[in-house]
Image (cartoon, helix red, strand yellow):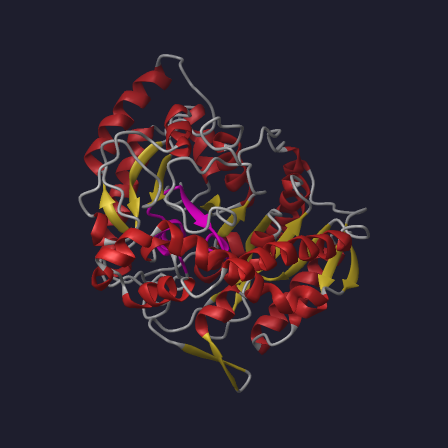
């Protein structure tokens, strides 16, 4: 049998259901992998391995007595450390909250627990989720398993590294300007940001309440769908949550995507690394071979993505963290503190104007779907930069690292539309690239169908880092 820690959650689930392996065997395999790799990667802030093994024994007994709950029963997962977990500290990536132990679970933690998932621990992250790099002075920087000198991406950096190397079956992250998709792309895995409101944010430390999206990081498209289905649905504790349908898995029956039109926003292909451009063009060719019609589209308002996002995100973040910013600013990771201070200088008028522009932006992006079913682009213009690099070079021109990493992700946070990243190849330095596929509001099914077809047509899901 292949390495249990690297096969898909979907396959693991079938093996557990058929009693070919036990949850305890799977947990033990992950404990071994964590022991081998954690000193290098620094994926976790808190490990709960003893509790996980005890729970795995209980769940193994449940399944052996005929009480199988479904596809997540006995599956080991890990959560970004801003999802509240009752009795387990939740730090939001800052030692300011090192002693914070919630009394109750976040809704997603509760739903995963009810589905029979096993928690292996809480994952490292950019402090307060306020950064796309995965750097953290308090708990140590996160390291990319393809090259430990490189960024994981953030803010869900530990989520990306843990799933990529096989420290857990799936991880949960949050995505405000790409923080699920960025680390997934840079670490060579799948990251799926569903429609805004599909997954409850109750018990999740906010960065920007109107832009935050919880979402899974997994090794395959179908794994992400299983995770979303387990967590989604209306939650009376979150006024933004919405009752939506489960995503059917019948997209797995065929990789024929004839009848689907793929739009390629030309603005998303500008100023990207030459090697990345080749990977994306190859991916588009694969989609065409699978039956999709390819159509060029234009999105002029993309140039305002960063301005709109920042004028909304920054004051919302500053508002939430205002007490510690006032009382103990010296304890906040400096790059985060500077961003929080900057949020104080965005006026109410600018915030309201950004929200008004957001509506125009949404209408223009939505109009692209009048003629296409999904939009496809690179997830990132670049491959993983070095840790602590403030700038990156793209074809001879210097760019700010954080701005580059969020450039192609922000549109789908501003609009709330679903977007997924899937691996699409590697650079000459063996660093992974990601293909981003986005769809209409609540049309996760079509996004998953196209992503799955591409995934199955390529070999990327079978490639894993070795450290």
Give the side of residue 396 with respect to residue 25, left or right.
right
Quarter of the image with the N terminus in it: top left
Residue ID at (52%, 46%)? 220
Residue ID at (51%, 33%)? 239
Q: Position of residue 10 (x, y in %)?
A: 49, 36
Residue ID at (24%, 53%)? 36
Single out the residue that lies furthest toward the top: 65
Residue in the foreground of this view, choosing between 347 and 91: 347
Q: Position of residue 143 (x, y in %)?
A: 32, 62
Residue in the foreground of this view, choosing between 293 and 361: 361
**Above or below: residue 160 compared with residue 440:** below
Kindly tell me whether residue 4 is visible in this rendering.
yes
Give the side of residue 341 with respect to residue 407, left or right.
left
Q: Which residues are magenta?
A: 154-181
Kindly tell me whether residue 383 is visible in this rendering.
no
Residue ID at (61%, 49%)? 456
Quarter of the image with the C terminus in it: bottom left
Is residue 178 magenta-colored? yes
């Amino acid at each position: 049998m292949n390495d249990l820690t690297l096969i898909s959650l979907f396959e693991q689930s079938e093996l557990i259901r058929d009693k070919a392996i036990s949850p305890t065997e799977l947990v033990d395999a992950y404990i071994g992998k964590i022991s081998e790799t954690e000193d290098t990667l620094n994926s976790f802030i808190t490990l709960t391995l003893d509790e996980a093994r005890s729970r795995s024994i209980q769940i193994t007994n449940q399944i052996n007595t005929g009480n199988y709950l479904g596809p997540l029963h006995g599956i080991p997962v890990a959560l970004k450390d801003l999802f509240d977990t009752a009795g387990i500290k939740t730090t939001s990536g800052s030692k300011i909250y090192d002693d914070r132990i919630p009394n109750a679970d976040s809704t997603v933690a509760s739903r995963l627990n009810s589905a029979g998932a096993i928690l292996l621990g809480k994952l490292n992250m950019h402090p307060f989720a306020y950064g796309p790099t995965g750097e953290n002075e308090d708990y140590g920087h996160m390291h990319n398993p393809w090259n430990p000198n490189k960024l994981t991406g953030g803010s869900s950096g530990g989520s990306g590294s843990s799933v990529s190397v096989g420290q857990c079956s799936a991880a949960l992250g949050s995505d405000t300007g790409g923080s699920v998709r960025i680390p997934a792309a840079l670490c060579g895995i799948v990251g799926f940001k569903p429609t805004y409101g599909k997954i409850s944010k109750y018990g999740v430390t906010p960065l920007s309440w109107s832009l935050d999206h919880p979402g899974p990081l997994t090794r395959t498209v179908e794994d992400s769908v299983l995770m979303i289905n387990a967590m989604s649905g209306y939650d009376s504790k979150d006024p933004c949550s919405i009752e939506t349908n489960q995503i059917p898995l019948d997209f797995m029956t065929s990789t024929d995507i004839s009848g689907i039109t793929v739009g390629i926003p030309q603005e998303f292909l500008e100023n990207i690394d030459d090697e990345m451009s080749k990977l994306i063009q190859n991916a588009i060719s694969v989609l065409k071979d699978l039956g999709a019609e390819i159509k060029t589209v234009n999105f002029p308002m993309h140039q305002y993505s960063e301005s709109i996002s920042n004028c909304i995100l920054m004051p919302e973040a500053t508002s939430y963290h205002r007490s510690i910013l006032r009382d103990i600013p010296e304890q906040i990771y400096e790059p985060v503190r500077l961003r929080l201070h900057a949020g104080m200088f965005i006026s109410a008028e600018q915030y309201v104007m950004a929200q008004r522009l957001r509506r125009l932006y949404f209408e223009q992006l939505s109009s692209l779907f009048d003629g296409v079913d999904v939009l496809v682009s690179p997830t990132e213009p670049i491959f993983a930069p070095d840790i602590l690099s403030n700038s990156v070079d793209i074809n001879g021109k210097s760019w700010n690292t954080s701005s580059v990493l969020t450039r192609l992700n922000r549109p789908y946070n501003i609009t709330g539309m679903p977007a997924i990243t899937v691996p699409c190849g590697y650079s000459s330095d063996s660093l992974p690239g990601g293909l981003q596929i986005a769809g209409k509001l609540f049309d996760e099914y079509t996004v998953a169908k196209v992503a799955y077809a591409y995934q199955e047509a390529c070999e990327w899901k079978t490639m894993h880092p070795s450290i």
